[in-house]
Image (spheres, rainbow, N blue to C red):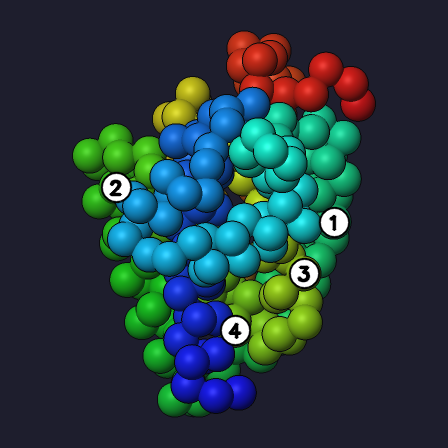
């Protein structure tokens, strides 16, 4: 890959992350029209990396490209949320189990992971204290991503990250509505403790509880924000 191609890919990836975050945190509302030229102007970029990022998000079913009109932010699919949640729960359980099996504090790399997790938890506590929902959501994502990294299965991690996006818009709303940040922090602390004890079964069960508690609020959120969701399952 030549230098130009690398630079173009990097730009497109950065635009992708920017647009993805705007979609997940509902800065772009479901059903809203967005425009390639406007985004390019806002970011001070040519339209090429913006177009590539939009095409990727369309392939992942976050955006709908409407010829001659623009790009529509897709409504949240209840069916997709349910399917993605099941897949995430299953695969992320594998990742947490593997992280527990691999944890060995005699390993220098594991001690780096330990320091990373402590730093992430400090950031989450600070976000909770200031009631910064957007920052808390971001640190929640980083926490789960770190466990995927510790697991070491890059293919599994890639699939989980992609599928998780379809749960994340409702997950963000759950944080915003419930403000159960202390509960989430407590859950994360328990998960770390179980990983450190090499308790693979225990951490998988605790993760299920953690995810199921969040999902228990989804019905109320779908009802309150009905205009954000597709009408059909």
Q: Secondary structure at mark 3?
A: helix
In this view, the mark in front (1 or 4): 1
In this view, the mark in front (3 or 4): 3
Q: Which mark is residue 87?
A: 1
Residue 2 vertical placement versus 32 (above, below): below
Label 1 and label 4: CA atoms lie apart by: 20 Å
In contact (CB < 8 Å): disc 3 and disc 1: yes
Residue 202 visible in the shown view: no
Q: Which mark is residue 127?
A: 2
Q: Which mark is residue 159?
A: 3
In this view, which residue lies farthest toward the right?
233
Q: Residues within 10 Å of mark 2 (few under 14, many from 20)?
A: some
Nearer to the camera, 35 or 185: 35
Label 3 and label 4: CA atoms lie apart by: 15 Å
Considering only order in the chain, which callout, 1 or 2, is on the residue closer to the N terminus? 1
Label 3 and label 2: CA atoms lie apart by: 28 Å
In contact (CB < 8 Å): disc 2 and disc 1: no
Residue 230 visible in the shown view: yes
Residue 138 vertical placement versus 149 (above, below): above
Q: Which residue is mark 4?
A: 150
Q: Secondary structure at mark 4?
A: helix
Q: Which mark is residue 3?
A: none
């Amino acid at each position: 890959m030549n230098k130009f191609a690398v630079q173009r890919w990097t730009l497109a990836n950065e635009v992708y992350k920017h647009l993805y975050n705007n979609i997940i945190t509902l800065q772009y509302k479901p059903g809203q029209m967005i425009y390639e030229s406007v985004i390019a102007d806002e970011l001070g970029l040519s339209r090429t990396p913006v177009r590539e990022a939009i095409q990727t998000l369309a392939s992942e079913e976050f955006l709908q490209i409407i010829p001659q009109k623009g790009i529509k932010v897709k409504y949240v699919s209840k069916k997709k949320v349910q399917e993605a949640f099941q897949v995430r729960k299953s695969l992320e359980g594998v990742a947490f189990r593997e992280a527990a099996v691999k944890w060995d504090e005699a390993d220098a790399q594991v001690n780096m992971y330990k320091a990373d997790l402590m730093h992430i938890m400090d950031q989450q506590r600070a976000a909770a204290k200031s009631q910064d929902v957007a920052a808390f959501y971001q640190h929640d994502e980083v926490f789960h991503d770190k466990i995927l990294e510790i697991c070491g299965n890059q293919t599994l991690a890639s699939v989980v990250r992609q599928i998780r996006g379809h749960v994340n818009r409702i997950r963000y709303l759950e944080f915003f509505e419930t403000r159960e940040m202390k509960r989430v922090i407590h859950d994360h602390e328990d998960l770390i403790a179980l990983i450190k004890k090499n308790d693979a079964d225990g951490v998988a069960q605790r993760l299920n509880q953690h995810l199921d508690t969040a999902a228990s609020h989804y019905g109320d959120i779908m009802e309150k924000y009905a205009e954000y969701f597709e009408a059909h399952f």
